[in-house]
Image (cartoon, rainbow, N blue to C red):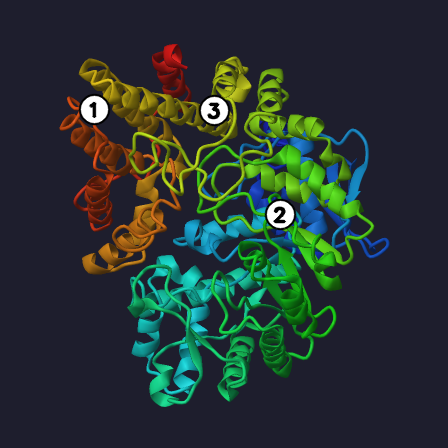
Amino acid sequence: MSHHQFPKINLNFFVLLIFLGMLLGNNLFAKPAKSNDTNSTETLALIERILPGKSSSFILETIAPKNKRDSFYIESKAGKILIKGTNTLSMAKGFNFYLKRYCHISVSWYANDVIKAPLNLPAITKPEGEACRFDKRFFLNYCTFGYTMLWWKWNDWERLIDWMALNGINMPLAITGQEYIWQKVWKQFGMTDAQSRAFFTGPSHLPWQRMGNLDRWLGPLPQSFIDNQFSLQKQILKRERSFGMTPILPAFAGHVPKDLKAKFPNMKVTDLGSYDTGTENDAFFLDPMDPLFVKIQKAYLSEQQKLLGTDHYYGADPFNEMNPPSWEASYLASVAKTIYGGMKAVDATATWVQMGWTFYYDRAHWTNPRLEAMIKAVPANKMVLLDYFTEQTEIWRPTDGFFNAPYIWCYLGNFGGNTQLAAPLLKVAKLLPAAENDPNSRQMAGIGSTLEGFGVNDFMFEWLFDYAWNKNAANTTDWIREYANSRAGNEDPVVQAAWKKLLPIVYNNQVSGVGLGNIVQSKPMLKGHGDYTSLSNYDYSTLANILPTMFLADSSSKSSLHYNRDLVLLEKQVFVNLAASLRDSISKAYYAKNEIAFEKNTHLFSSLCDDVNTLTATQHELLLGNWLDEARSFGITPEEKNYYEKSARVLITTWGGEDNVTSDYASKDWSGLIGSYYKLRWELFFNELRKTIKTGQEPDMVAFNKLRAKFDWDWTGKNQVEQKFPSKPSGNTLQTCTDLYKKWSLYL
């Protein structure tokens, strides 16, 4: 028996501790639960990141799959939440089901979004479960790595990977950091590091360089960026694989540096252009019949496998928005055969993943005989096609299910990171079940999303991956009610009703397409709109009538981050819609030579721009300053910081050089961008109109557009040192929305 004396315990203090422990859901001394089960270990780590301190409130069990389908079941057990799943992703999906259904928690893909957890986790009233009907759940697009993830670091990626796991996604595109590997490969073929860096574009345009659309633009790429992105890719792949995902890594599709000609003067290459950024930036395609082609493919895949391992899926997309050297079916077949042959030489179990955007974009040239020849040149089931833009056109239908090759039905939904309220849920909720149940759907192997940017319509992507597990998601009325609860953080009839009313207006089949924007973002003109700022086609007044109902939400909803964001996005949309009628009033006044009406309406237009700028300043992901500061953080010296900022500015405005044809493609309602760019170029236009309003003659748009294009390009050369844009949200969201609505309500 020990002779050590125990200290006296203050009984009242001890009872207080017990009481506090009970009050905090047994988490006062909680540590993350431990498990020897790999599935459980990874899921518990996810739970701890989403709900810090509460992972010990969950019990996780791995179960055997039924009919080879991923599934999960949840129930309450011994005061805890039991989640059973066939694998890590199934458990993560079950956890997300619990968060939405019982906690009314919406987990976004943004790392800065704080998750507000209930003090005590709600019990599950009855056991529930779901089984996934699709083996493959694909996510991302080459362009997303520019328009959204360009400046992301690990904390951003960690949240996105968690979001993908929560939504059951198992096939993410994983193309970060490949320049590090290409640099090693090009060195094997006689190029210096400096030459390969000059071949690469600047950071902002790497997605298009990777697709073979252009070279060199805004380069050379800094070595530090190449090295850091490769390190980031290793973190990304490690986490994705820990969830049981199968990342799709890049392969060689024929795009080569022009400098290789010096070492291999007889190599057969074709100039494929440069997206109007100048002939010096033209991309070149190596003929697959050239013996060098397979050598490069083998070199790249061998180096990549050595450095990053493999999950046996490889993305390769020859001729993306480019004309091949020949349209002969036999030639296209030889291209496919050679590309896949190089993959198989390095990885005997390789599967080629080909995006179908090419075949939608230029359907006139990609006839069935040509497409069939290309697909059938690859062994059966070794090419998986992404039917890229199915909400617009389902390519699988006129091609007899891609000639019986496996394909993934993909919703695109966002081009360029545009920030319009636009997502055709009602349309997709009919198209997708029709495809799934079509007796001729052939090898429809999965569903996915090929979004170019994260924009503002988060719910559409959550719906898509919910549908993979829950057929009843096709009942959009029920689904949107649950979603509204997760946004409000509680069951608020007002928020539910608002979302229900939004569906047939904003989220219908008329509002999905390229360059969806608004008049504020448009190149200034008295009639029509810019090429990449086409207006949404719905009744603007009906949308404006929904806005005031949102202010009637209860106090609990008004404390929700997501309610506040949704309110801002709705009000923002109502205001930029109003800008269209103000522009028309300006036009009418100009042609009527009515200077008083002209001045009144131009003043209102500028004031509205200021207020949208103020409104969006309340939201972190709608800040130009955040985008620019993230870019600058990649640099060490002032020169480096300015270099990265230039890259960031160009992508979201001119895209290419001065007066590039793709200007405004990535238009966004961002605070800072509205005030310093969109508003000022409209005011430049108004000033030009003042010179000719007395005559009422047509303005000289050729001359003005040169002036406007110079303004646009000059803007890309400025930096955060000269004019600082805040990178942190400002203002009380609810108060700002209320005040601005009162100001403009008479005009709505």
Q: Is residue 31 visible?
A: no
> Mark 1: few, some, or many residues within 10 Å (few <14, many ≥20)?
some
Amino acid type indicated by mark 2: Thr
> Mark 3: few, some, or many residues within 10 Å (few <14, many ≥20)?
many
| Image-based side of 546 in relation to 697, left or right | right
Q: Which residue is mark 3?
A: 567
**Picture mark count:** 3
Q: Which residue is mark 2?
A: 393
Residue placed most toward the observer, 673 or 373: 373
Residue farthest to the top, as pictured:
746
- Estimate the x, y position of residue 534 in percent, counting from the top left: 43, 37
Q: Which residue is mark 1?
A: 696
Q: Secondary structure at mark 2?
A: loop
| Image-based side of 159 in relation to 663, left or right | right
Q: Earlier in the sequence, mark 2 or mark 1?
A: 2
- Estimate the x, y position of residue 447 in percent, counting from the top left: 68, 51
Amino acid type indicated by mark 3: Leu
Residue plotted at (68% across, 79% down): 348
- Estimate the x, y position of residue 140 in percent, counting from the top left: 55, 53
